Image (tube, grey):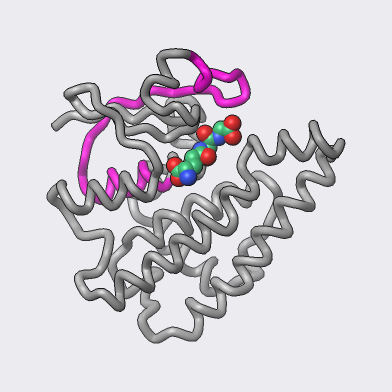
Amino acid sequence: MTFRLHNFFRSSTSTRLRAALNLKGIEYDYVAYALRKGETRTAGFLSMNPAGLVPVLEREDGSALVQSLAIIEWLDETQPGPRLLPEDPDGRARVRALAYMIACEIHPLNNLRVLNRLADQFGADEAAQKAWFHHWVETTFEALEVMLAQDSRTGRFCHGDTPGLADCCLYAQVWNNRRFDINTGRWPTIARIFDALDALPAFRDAAPPNQPDGA
Ligand SMILES: N[C@@H](CCC(=O)N[C@@H](CS)C(=O)NCC(=O)O)C(=O)O
């Protein structure tokens, strides 16, 4: 099956999906959209995802999958390659919990459209938007650090020594944090896992600066 990935280099939801595709060894055509130029608001894009958000994974029959975590789980269930979620229910619950902390409790609060809304509705300037972004990252990363540092199931990566769904989310979020000058060194376990992931080609090749529209 061939795939087209509709995405944006700096989008963390796109980064997490790129990492998952790479881990699975799946090749894809890269289609770039500049979010700030409104390129995901065209009729063509909205016919794939009425929400106007990236990423979208288009399959060869033209059907589109949306929502990065749903796409990653679909890939895991249908495509060969290393498993991104553990086999055991307890392990799956833990990996999903770590992933959702980032995907549900940081990303939606710090998304571009939320920062834009803060500016439009409340007059938040760049400094205020940055403080907002820091607040929600710090709130969750403090807890994430404890959960990772105190659980013996944490290994080289978030869950054992094989990278998976939670690692895709963590890696992408740390890249996003850098744009807002957040130093991950404050959270030693998260920093260690990020460094281990960054040494893997699957993750490095998914990183924002290594994309065609990010060069
Ligand atoms: N929950 C969705 C979120 C998708 C999303 O919000 N994507 C962002 C980029 S990271 C986007 O397209 N933002 C455009 C905007 O905020 O206008 C997912 O995981 O795929």
Residue 206 shown in magenta = no
Quick check: can you spot residue 118? yes
Q: Classify residue 112 as left or right of residue 154.
A: right
Q: Classify residue 92 as left or right of residue 215.
A: left
In percent of width and height, residue 136 lies at: 68, 58
**Residue bounds of the magenta highlight:** 16-42
Quick check: can you spot residue 13? no
In percent of width and height, residue 83 lies at: 21, 60
Q: Residue at point 67% right, 66% down?
A: 139
Q: Residue at point 41% right, 28% down?
A: 49
In percent of width and height, residue 3 lies at: 23, 30
In-front residue for pair 28/209: 28
Image vertical order of residue 53 relative to residue 71, above or below: above
Q: Residue at point 24% right, 48% down?
A: 74
Image vertical order of residue 125 relative to residue 170, above or below: above
Image vertical order of residue 124 relative to residue 38, above or below: below
Q: Residue at point 43% right, 32% down?
A: 211
In-front residue for pair 11/69: 69
